Amino acid sequence: MDTASAKDQSPVTNADIWILATGGTIDKAYPRMLGGWAFEIAEPAAGSILDRVNLNDTYAVQSVCKKDSQEITSEDRQLLLESCAKARSSKILVTHGTDTLIET
């Protein structure tokens, strides 16, 4: 798996599928120290999920932001749009929380 960092918004590799992660439930972690009552946005889960399946395509994962979807701003949406435009793949998958998916 190839991974582009959140700070490097220019994809550095060609991949069959380019995954842009914004956070949301799929990336939430519930630290045990907090008794499961709070969460933080962890590293994108898409790569570890796809590692478990027999996928014939290559993929790259890029973290655009790490936010609950209720915290996504217009600037984050613009960054997501720019990341889509820069992706070196015709197949783009965006992981996003459900609360503001329509707005994005």
Image: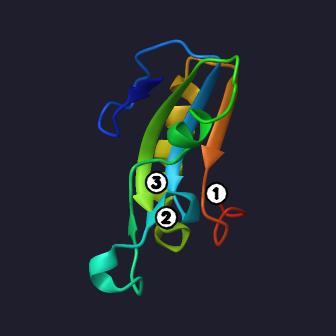
* 1 or 2: tag closer to the N-terminus: 2
Q: Which mark is residue 72?
A: 2
- Label 2 CA crowd tier, 10 Å (few <14, some 14–19, many 20+): many
Q: Which residue is mark 3?
A: 76
User: What distance separates the C-alpha of mark 3 from that of mark 1?
Assistant: 9 Å
Q: Residues within 10 Å of mark 3 (few under 14, many from 20)?
A: some
Q: Are marks 3 and 2 in contact (CB under 8 Å)?
A: yes
Q: Tell whether 104 sits left or right of 68.
A: right
**Front-lying residue, 20 or 58:** 58
| x, y percent for residue 29 | 42, 66
**Residue 8, quarter of picture:** top left
Cβ–Cβ under 8 Å for marks 1 and 2: yes
Quadrant hosting residue 103: bottom right
Q: Residue at x 50, y 34 (%)?
A: 83
Placement of 84 over or under 27, stated as above or below: above
Disc number for residue 60: none
**Disc 2 on helix, strand or loop?**
loop
The percent position of residue 16, horizontal first and vertical second, equals 65, 17
Q: In this figure, which residue is indicated by the disc labeled 1?
A: 104
Check disc 3 and report its element: helix, strand or loop.
Answer: helix
Q: In the picture provided, is 69 more to the left or to the right than 39?
A: right
Considering the numbered disc 1 on the image, is that residue within a helix, a strand or a loop? loop
Instruction: Tell me where residue 26 appears, x and y as whole percent.
Output: 57, 58
Task: Give the alpha-carbon distance from disc 3 to disc 2, as whole Å.
Answer: 6 Å
Q: Looking at the picture, which amino acid does disc 1 mark?
A: Thr
Residue ID at (41%, 57%): 66
Viewer-closest of 56 and 61: 56
Q: Amino acid at mark 3?
A: Asp
- In this view, 29 is above or below 79: below
* Displayed quadrant of residue 20: top right
Front residue of this view, candidates 94 and 103: 94
Circle 1 residues within 10 Å: few <14, some 14–19, many ≥20: some
